[in-house]
Image (spheres, rainbow, N blue to C red):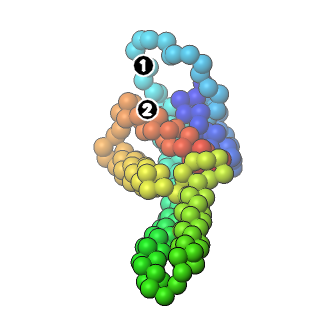
Amino acid sequence: MSEAPNLVDLLSREQPIALESLRARYPSEAQIFSSERLLGDAEPGRVPQFNATQRSAMLDLISTAVSRCAADFDALADSIRETMKKVARIRYVGSLIASISGGLAGILAIALSNALIQAITAFLAMLGGIAAATAEQFERAPSGIRIASAEEYSKIIEMRANLEIMLTKLQRDKILPLDDQDVRNMLAELDKYAACLIRLKMA
């Protein structure tokens, strides 16, 4: 079973040619490039070390995945940032309308009847409510996830920064070789990122 089924699943959707190239390059390591999931807990005991071919296959998978995930996170961050700007503008307009309606009621009280003042302030309150509802609608994906929220955006930025750290480690591997546990940890982290990308793309 694969150690990173979500990651392999993401690559099979978005970079099938690259994934097939890896499978062809390492025909004896089909398990690494499988999206099958292991049910239940893994058997306890000492974790086996990678042989040279397995290590090379893992690092090539990680390298391909880092590039794919970085591109996806960049695109998502750009899209979410633009949506966040729209939401911020709409909420700002709503706040202005709420502030104006309070002050306007006092000014209009000098010259207009109470009924007319109530009608005008009610109309402004309605506009403020529409602005708030519109902002909420823009912020959420069809699934209900607040995809354009500051919390979701900060998670994406953090994961994108971690990808740069992984890339640096990969580039230094020939000088400062990663041990097997480092490779496994990177693969496990990338699998989480792939699961997050799949969730956001399906939202």
**Residue 110 percent location from the top left of the image:** 44, 85
Residue located 42% across and 23% down the image: 49
Camera-side residue of 95 and 200: 95
Find numbered disc 2 in the image and state the secondary structure of the residue it sits on: helix
Residue located 48% across and 55% down the image: 149
Camera-side residue of 51 and 103: 103
**Residue 85 percent location from the top left of the image:** 49, 69
Mark linked to residue 169: none
Q: Is residue 22 visible?
A: no
Farthest residue in the top direction? 44
Q: Which residue is mark 2?
A: 184
Quadrant containing the N terminus in the rendered view: top right
Q: Mark 1, residues whose alpha carbon is within 10 Å: few (<14), some, or many (≥20)?
A: few
Give the quarter of the image for residue 181: top left
The reply, left or right, for residue 136 in relation to residue 13 is: left
Camera-side residue of 68 and 157: 157
Q: Is residue 38 visible?
A: yes
Amino acid of disc 1: Val
The reply, left or right, for residue 163 in relation to residue 127 is: left
Q: Mark 2, residues whose alpha carbon is within 10 Å: few (<14), some, or many (≥20)?
A: some
**Residue 101 percent location from the top left of the image:** 48, 75
Q: Which residue is mark 1?
A: 47
**Residue 156 percent location from the top left of the image:** 46, 52
Find numbered disc 1 in the image and state the secondary structure of the residue it sits on: loop
Farthest residue in the left direction? 176
Question: Which circle's residue, 1 or 2, is located before the other in the chain?
Answer: 1
Amino acid of disc 2: Arg
1 and 2 marks in contact (CB < 8 Å): yes
